[in-house]
């Protein structure tokens, strides 16, 4: 069975109460529950990781080598400036789909740039929690094409 890791970066543990006008009221736990249901529908195994720390996210990406087939990742604000996370994604050689709850192209100028996006196989943004579900579909479709 394909093994997918869903990763979340800084401040995403506060979903549900954080800037609800932008991110909605759905909690990270709820999103993870939706991902479990979607993974069951797709017939894949899913695990989760969230950290507010750049190095911890990088360590988890490294650990995914050999233990996961692909990653759905919301790097949070690191999206816009973490060359270290970008390099980690490029280094592990696993397909990564970048997801965002909000439409980062329609927000402040600094959010319009994703330094991580170019090393991902795709980006899904602006669908709220649905971005994660579409991200899972994109990743699994890609992985099944590889076989
Ligand atoms: C976000 C968008 C980022 O710009 C922001 O820093 C986040 C959340 C999103 O899911 O819309 O933390 O990644």
Image (tube, grey):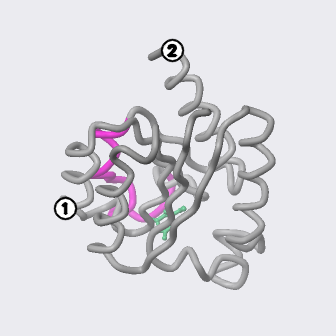
Which residue is at a point 27% across and 37% down the rendered structure image? 93
Residue nearest the viewer, comparing 42 with 119: 42
Within the magenta stretch, is there residue 62? no
109 left or right of 68 in image: left
Which residue is at a point 48% across and 15% down the rendered structure image? 147
Which residue is at a point 78% across and 54% down the rendered structure image? 34
> Residue at label 2?
145
86 left or right of 72 in image: left
Among numbered discs 2 and 1, the one appearing first in the sequence: 1
Q: Are marks 2 and 1 in contact (CB under 8 Å)?
A: no
Secondary element type, mark 2: helix
Quadrant where the N terminus lies?
top right
Q: Tell me the mark number nearer the camera, choosing from 2 and 1.
A: 2
How many numbered marks appear? 2
Which residue is at a point 77% across and 67% down the rendered structure image? 30
Magenta stretch, residue numbers: 106-120
Within the magenta stretch, is there residue 107? yes
Tell me if mark 2 has few (under 14), some (14-19) or many (20+) residues whose alpha carbon lies within 10 angstroms of its own: few
Q: Considering only vertical position in the picture, is 140 above or below 98?
A: above
Secondary element type, mark 1: helix
Residue nearest the viewer, comparing 17 with 55: 55
Q: Is mark 1 within 8 Å of ligand 1?
A: no
Q: Is mark 2 within 8 Å of ligand 1?
A: no
Residue 13 in picture, x, y percent from top left: 58, 79
Q: Can you tell which mark lies on residue 84?
A: 1
């Amino acid at each position: 069975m394909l093994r997918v890791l869903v990763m979340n970066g800084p401040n995403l543990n506060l979903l549900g109460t954080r800037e609800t006008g932008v991110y909605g009221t759905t909690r990270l736990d709820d999103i993870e529950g939706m991902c479990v249901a979607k993974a069951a529908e797709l017939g894949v195994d899913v695990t989760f990781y969230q950290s507010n720390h750049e190095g911890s996210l990088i360590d988890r990406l490294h650990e995914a080598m050999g233990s996961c087939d692909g990653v759905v990742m919301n790097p949070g604000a690191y999206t816009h400036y973490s060359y270290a996370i970008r390099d980690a994604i490029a280094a592990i050689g696993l397909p990564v789909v970048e997801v965002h709850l909000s439409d980062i192209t329609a927000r402040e100028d600094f959010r319009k740039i994703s330094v991580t996006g170019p090393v991902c196989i795709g980006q899904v943004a602006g669908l709220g929690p649905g971005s994660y579900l579409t991200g899972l579909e994109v990743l699994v479709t890609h992985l099944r094409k590889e076989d």
